[in-house]
Image (cartoon, rainbow, N blue to C red):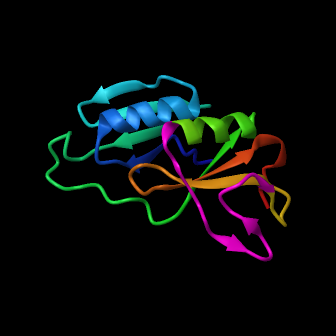
Amino acid sequence: MPQIFRILLPVTDIQQAKSFYTKVLGVEGFPVSPGRHYFDCEGIILACFDPQSDGDGYTAQPNPEDLYIAVDNIEETYTHCNEAGATFSDFEDPDVGKMGVIEKRPWGEVSFYIKDPFGNGICFVDRKTVFTG
């Protein structure tokens, strides 16, 4: 069976990304190259990647879709996101709720949505409520 082992997260400042994700995820991660900093998320690497710092000659663009991360303590993660300077979603759907606050969604997940400093959308989900279909 295939296994996802690395997800690239495009960033435009690797030091800012390291700082932001260290605060949000609560782990230091480790540098791999001048433009890559890896965070081990239970065997799947979240790879912050700044192509300019790696000499690749182009500027990173945010991922077009949200990345979903399960966490053990959703309230603590929310606080860490706030302290790290995340932008909380202001989108509100009458059927789904306010996306930038911790709420239980109609499909059962307890979650909130942010944008990182580089425009990547991240949804943090309480691990106890993860919906897998």
Instruction: Residue 87 in the image: state x and y as whole percent.
Output: 52, 53
Q: Is residue 87 above or below residue 53?
A: below
Residue ID at (34%, 26%): 31
Residue 100: in magenta span: yes
Residue ID at (51%, 47%): 86
Instruction: Residue 103 in the image: state x and y as whole percent.
Output: 79, 56
Q: Is residue 66 above or below residue 92?
A: above
Residue 27 position by quadrant? top right
Left or right of 53 in this view: 28: right
Residue ID at (73%, 40%): 74
* Residue 4 visible in this rendered orientation of the protein: yes
Left or right of 103 in this view: 30: left
Residue 63: in magenta span: no
- Magenta residues, dominant SS class: loop
Q: Is residue 73 above or below residue 60?
A: above
Query: Which stretch is magenta?
Result: 84-103
> In the image shown, does 2 or 123 lie closer to the viewer?
123
Instruction: Residue 122 in the image: state x and y as whole percent.
Output: 56, 53
> In the image shown, does 114 or 53 lie closer to the viewer?
114
> In the image shown, does 11 or 101 lie closer to the viewer?
101
Q: Quadrant of the C terminus?
A: bottom right
